Amino acid sequence: MTIKNKRTPKVVIIGAGMTGLLVAIKLREAGIDDIIILEKKDKLGGTWRENTYPGVACDVPAHMYTYSFEPNPNWSHRFAYGDEIQAYFEHVATKYKVLPIIRFNEAVESCHFNDATWTLKTSKGETYTADFVVSATGILHHPAKPDIPGLDSFKGECFHTAQWNHDVSLKGKHVGIIGTGSTAAQVIPEVAKEAAKLSVFQRTPQWLVNLPNKAFSEKQKARWRSKPDLLKRLHRWYTFGVEQTFSKAVIGKKFQHALINILCRLNLWLSIKDPALRAKLKPDYRVGCKRIIVNSTFYDAIQQPNVELVTSGIDHITPEGIKTKAGVFHPLDVLILSTGFHPFNFMRPMDLRGKNGVKIDERWGRKVQAYRSLLIPEFPNFFLMLGPNTPIGNFSVIAMSEVQTEYILKLIGRWQNEEFNEVSATDTALQNFNDYLKEGMKGTVWLGGCQSWYLDEDGDPAMWPYSWKQWVKEMHAPDMSDLLTE
Ligand code: NAP
């Protein structure tokens, strides 16, 4: 009897961030070697390469924010800082020999499907073909500039937190920061240490939970190095802990929501001494409606004598500073935009075309959707990692990417067995999936009367409204009856 060799696909991965590296490592483990990663910048790391603002850290516990197969005994703190996370991904890329397959400084400009093959053209003028394309471009990588009259007229230094200008000294300057989201909560305490005066322009207050950032001792790290099983246990423990608390609180579990609610309210009450300031910092929407900020330094910083919280709304920006709706002028030397991202762009502005030349903008129109967050009808053999409705309340995106990677490996395995040449989701499956999501949204806090980056133009949250366990269960294996194969 002759054993038929499996066919081997050519795979192009777009993006050398956390997800792109993971997919490459897992494909290799499955015996698939014909892989390249196209990376638009000169360095890997994605969000951790881009975000270098002072104070940048991950608000998911470090021992949970690691690949399950590569625990790290050397994390310095419970919540790791950006440079350490960047170093971790560089270490993983080196250890797993991913660097040689990354083509740096090659942004994908077009990606077209024809005859069961993807053809990609890059900014370097190169052309690549692939049987599968994995879009690993992340969620929050298109900085959003606020639409405030006069912004471009400001004549001091002005930059977004995700494009931090390290050449600008803040020492002795009057600095303005627009925004009070997760990023601002991390950056404000650091800027407050440098600036002569810091004006924080808040449009909407946020709920914060205080989990101190414990430093790990050398003794503790040595123990983890000598007993790797402890680290695996810690990974599981944190995953269980976050799943049982934060992730359940946001999807309508009453006990967990009450717990986080009390923690946030107590944090505000105990941290802010002045009742007037406390009132300004108190949100009027439910805890969790916007992403809960995990932070132990913002409330202290906002009470420093050189820091003022401005809540009267920005009317316009002049070359010299900001004029509020209350008519007060705030002269500024430096203006920092901590105004978030465009989360619905994904791989765009890439010219992505599926079957019969259909463009991604035509397909999505105003509604960005993907079956199981990964598969787009008419875009066969194309996987959108961390696509819409992936995010699970305050959970680790690494864990989510690992589950999605296993799912796509199963589909690629079927292709290798020649069960099909092309696979995509059916329109019906996408519709059913979205109906199912919509039903689940009813019990969540995201519809709790606030604006957030979770919501699309129709006010639908692009989140997963059920539990982490449920997601893992449903992602365990592709349901082939939902998929169109040729
Ligand atoms: P964000 O949560 O979207 O916050 C943007 C801030 O800018 C909000 O306070 C928003 O006010 C304000 N803003 C936007 N446009 C404005 C305008 N025209 N005028 C006045 N204010 C304006 O963005 P982010 O803080 O960068 O965080 C985004 C996400 O990144 C987080 O939710 C989190 O998932 C992730 N993140 C994670 C970490 C981590 O530790 N893992 C750290 C940083 C970020 P409104 O609230 O009124 O809209």
Image: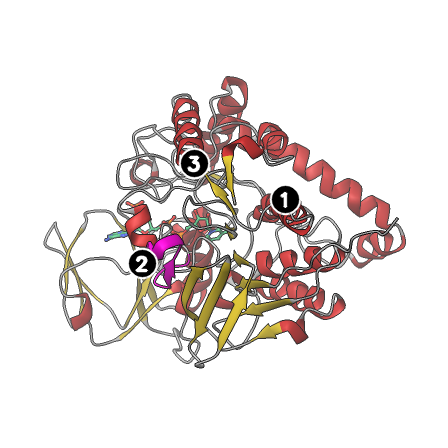
| Label 3: which secondary element | helix
Residue that appears at 47% across and 67% down: 119
Residue that appears at 68% across and 39% down: 238
Rendered view: 231 above or below 305: above
Image x and y of residue 303, in percent: 39, 50
Single out the mark in the foreground, 2 or 3.
2
Specify the label residue 144 is tagged with: 2
| Label 2: which secondary element | loop
Callout 3–callout 1 Cβ contact below 8 Å: no
Task: Tell me where residue 98 sits by quadrant.
Answer: bottom right
Callout 1–callout 2 Cβ contact below 8 Å: no
Q: Which residues are magenta?
A: 347-358
Specify the label residue 419 is tagged with: 1
Query: Residue at the top extreme?
Result: 254
> Is residue 418 in the magenta section?
no
Specify the label residue 268 is tagged with: 3
Distance from the alpha carbon under mark 2 to that under mark 3? 28 Å
Image x and y of residue 177, in percent: 32, 60
